[in-house]
Amino acid sequence: MDIYKQLEDLTLSNQLSLEEIPNIDLYMDQVIQLFESKFSSSKRNDDEKVLTKTMINNYAKGKLLFPIKNKKYSKDHILLIAMIYQMKSALSISDVGKTLKGINHQVSEGDIQLEEFYGSYLRLMEKNVELFEEFISSQQNSVGEEINNKEVSEADYLQQVLLILSFTGMSNFFRKAAEKMVDNLVWKEENKDEA
């Protein structure tokens, strides 16, 4: 079994770079087109949508984005949508909203340069890809040791099942850790509002 061949198609390092985002405001259809062109290779099947009008409208209604002006999305809106895109598969929309509440406020007030923050995020994701690849190698070795005495035809299947179990287990660990952090996330402006 060649796990690397199977995971090659994941395009883990595929992120929306700052250079790919136009410096002009975009209409919703243009935003959707940008995301479809960038992330279509990440879709599991052709029926899956990367981003839809309904999704964007729900993000706006749920206050995951600071207010849109004249039906156009700024570069900062697009950066937020890119971060939402990454978080929504692991966290509830409510948790994503809570996570980004302070960021949205700071962007609206001009207290944060979102491009700089997003650049930090992109650098962390590059490191995460490296760590993931190291983890895959380690897990494949561990699984191989667990299955080393099985028949070849049976071993391949059992290795894949153990890897699936391991990956979903780690995914759950990370999701639970993220949820715990969301539950304990305190933005200093929230404390001012309550005082």
Image (cartoon, rainbow, N blue to C red):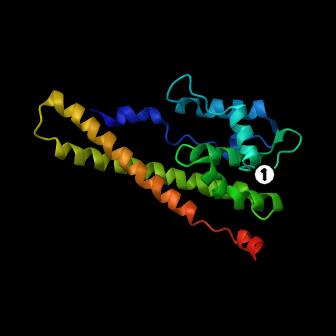
Mark 1 Cα-neighbour bin, 10 Å: few <14, some 14–19, many ≥20? many
**Residue 53, placed above or below residue 187:** above
User: How many dots with numbers?
Assistant: 1
Going 40% across and 36% down the picture, which residue do you hit? 7
Judge by depth and name the residue closer to the eye, 73 or 195.
195
Q: Which residue is mark 1?
A: 66
Q: Is residue 29 above or below residue 165?
A: above
> What percent of the width, then of the height, locates residue 189?
74, 70
In the picture, measured across the screen, residue 164 lies left or right of residue 183, that is left
Q: Is residue 89 placed above or below 37 in the rendered structure?
A: below
Q: Which residue of the protein is positioned furthest toward the bottom in this rendering? A: 195
From the viewer's perspective, tell me whether residue 93 is left or right of residue 42. right
Q: Position of residue 30 (x, y in %)?
A: 76, 31
Q: Is residue 25 visible?
A: no
Left-right relation of 11 to 156? right
Give whichever of 41, 162 is nearer the camera: 162
Amino acid on which disc 1 is placed: Phe
For the C terminus, the quadrant is: bottom right
Q: Quadrant of residue 188?
A: bottom right
Which residue is rendered at x = 49% and y = 41% of the image? 12
Q: Residue at x 74, y 49 (%)?
A: 65
User: Is residue 99 toward the left or the right of residue 57 in the image?
Assistant: left
Which quarter of the picture shows residue 16?
Answer: top right
Residue 1: image x %, image y %? Answer: 26, 32
* Residue at image location 83% in from the left, 45% down from the top: 68
